[in-house]
Image (tube, helix red, strand yellow):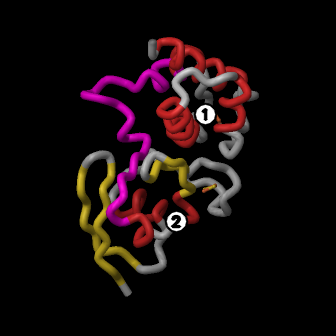
């Protein structure tokens, strides 16, 4: 059984008929081909599927699309502005904060939510904001430094 869902994603409105059992993560990846949001544990434990809903980090694997209709959703594809990388993306690239890159989309949107409300966070605030995003590669230090670099450039 399918239902018609209307979602506002990265500034665009999408109407999609989708299976009622699909999560927001599945709808983004399978129906809209927005594959930047990663499919990890599907249990709410890894943060790879993090997107922003009304500015707040949300786990797309635990979210039903119908619950977020009418709200602004931002995925990693929506971070760049006019074709230019978001300062967080630039800092991640410069400092090697992405290795395999699987956690990076979730890290980036969680970090964006932090900087949008706390432009100059402390290291502890960064740790807390990213606590739900697991990385098996970096040891986290480069990620924290990249967030600090982006924050430092925001003036
Ligand atoms: S895939 Fe959603 S938290 Fe892991
Ligand atoms: S860069 Fe590989 S999981 Fe984080």
- Secondary structure type for disc 2: loop
Residue that label 2 marks? 63
Left or right relative to 98: residue 24: left
Alpha-carbon distance for marks 1 and 2?
26 Å
- Secondary structure type for disc 1: loop
Q: Tell me, yes or no, whether the highlighted magenta stretch contains residue 70.
A: yes
The residue lying at 62 percent from left, 62 percent from top is 42
Asked if marks 1 and 2 touch (Cβ < 8 Å), the reply is no
The residue lying at 70 percent from left, 23 percent from top is 123
Residue 100's label in the rendered image is 1
* Magenta stretch, residue numbers: 69-92
Considering every residue shown, the one lying at the far bottom of the view is: 1
Spot occupied by residue 85 in the image (x, y as percentages of width and height)? 37, 25
Q: Looking at the rendering, which quadrant does residue 133 occupy?
A: top right
Q: In this view, does 107 lie above or below 92?
A: below
Of the numbered discs 1 and 2, the one sitting upstream in the chain is: 2
Give the crowd class for mark 2: few <14, some 14-19, many >=20 residues within 10 Å.
Answer: some
Considering every residue shown, the one lying at the far front of the view is: 117
The residue carrying mark 1 has its beta carbon less than 8 Å from ligand 2 = yes
Q: Looking at the rendering, which quadrant does residue 59 occupy?
A: bottom right
């Amino acid at each position: 059984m399918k239902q018609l869902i209307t979602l506002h994603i990265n500034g665009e409105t999408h109407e999609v008929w989708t299976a009622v059992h699909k999560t927001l993560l599945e709808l983004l990846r399978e129906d809209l081909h927005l594959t930047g949001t990663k499919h990890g544990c599907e249990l709410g434990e890894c943060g790879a599927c993090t997107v922003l809903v009304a500015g707040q980090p949300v786990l797309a694997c635990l979210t039903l699309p119908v619950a977020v209709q009418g709200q602004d959703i931002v995925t990693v594809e929506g971070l760049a502005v006019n074709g230019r990388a978001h300062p967080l993306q630039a800092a991640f690239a410069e400092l090697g904060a992405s290795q395999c890159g699987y956690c990076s989309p979730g890290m980036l949107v969680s970090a964006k939510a932090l900087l949008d409300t706390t432009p100059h966070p402390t290291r502890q605030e960064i740790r807390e904001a990213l606590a739900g995003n697991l990385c098996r590669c970096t040891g986290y230090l480069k990620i924290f430094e990249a967030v600090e670099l982006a924050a430092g450039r925001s003036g």
